Amino acid sequence: MKRFIGACAVMAAFSLPASAALTAGQPAPDFDAQASLAGKAAPYSLKDALKKGPVVVYFYPSAFTSGCNVQAHEFAVKSDKFAAAGASIIGVSLDSIARLNEFSADPEYCNSKFPVASDADGRIARSYDLSVQQGRAGQKDTRGAEIGHDFAERTTFIVSPEGKVVATVGGMSAKSNVEKALEAVQAYAVSRGK
């Protein structure tokens, strides 16, 4: 019990919620979504993923945009470290599954290391108390393609196998977001004796 309380204090240091996002100790809303891994779409279930260990649920504005490209690349590069701490990763955005099929397989970004889920109507983002901002008509991504969807704020949640938010990481750069998420996952693994 002391170890868990100590871990909660450590997790609080990483709980930097943007706006009114869910915070440590709150239930993480379950979700099912169409996701893409290595360019192939398939159903994703948070409930099923949590049976294998903690899950890093990271929300990002849009595939193929500068910050999101950096964030996906960093998660891909550090994916082995997340796995060593027992955690899996799922990215969530309002992108269509067609855009995510390209993004998930791109060797510069997700590099087929983790799935990215389509939350086209923003329902999942809103269930995590994240704001969704309206996209501008004609807005283009880093490839010059029109984006055509709204944007969830960049926030990462570490979710325990019991379905509770362990840490919330937001309000920082894309690269720092991944670094703090990894620190939170590693601290959580230590608290569980892993």
Image (spheres, rainbow, N blue to C red):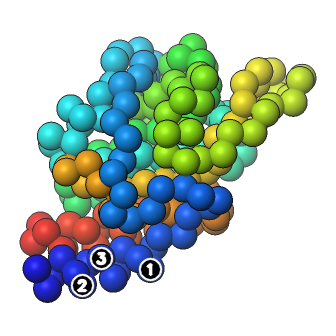
Nearer to us in this view, 145 or 96: 96
Of helix, strand and loop, which one carries label 1?
helix
Q: Residue at x 15, y 40 (%)?
A: 51
Q: Mark 3 points at which residue?
A: 8
In the image, residue 17 lies at what x, y percent?
A: 56, 64
Crowding at dot 1, Cα within 10 Å, few <14 / some 14-19 / many 20+, comes out as: some
Q: Which of marks 3 and 1 is nearer the N terminus?
A: 3
Quarter of the image where one finds residue 61: top right
Q: Residue at x 79, y 33 (%)?
A: 134
Q: Is mark 2 on a helix, strand or loop?
A: helix
Q: In this view, does 95 lie above or below 130?
A: above
Name the amino acid, label 3: Cys
In screen coordinates, is 158 left or right of 60? Answer: left
138 in relation to 73, above or below: above
Q: Which residue is drawn at 36% across and 47% down?
A: 28
Based on the displayed image, in which of its 4 quarters is residue 84 positioned?
Answer: bottom left
Q: Mark 2 points at which residue?
A: 6
In the rendered view, would you say 95 is above or below 191?
Answer: above
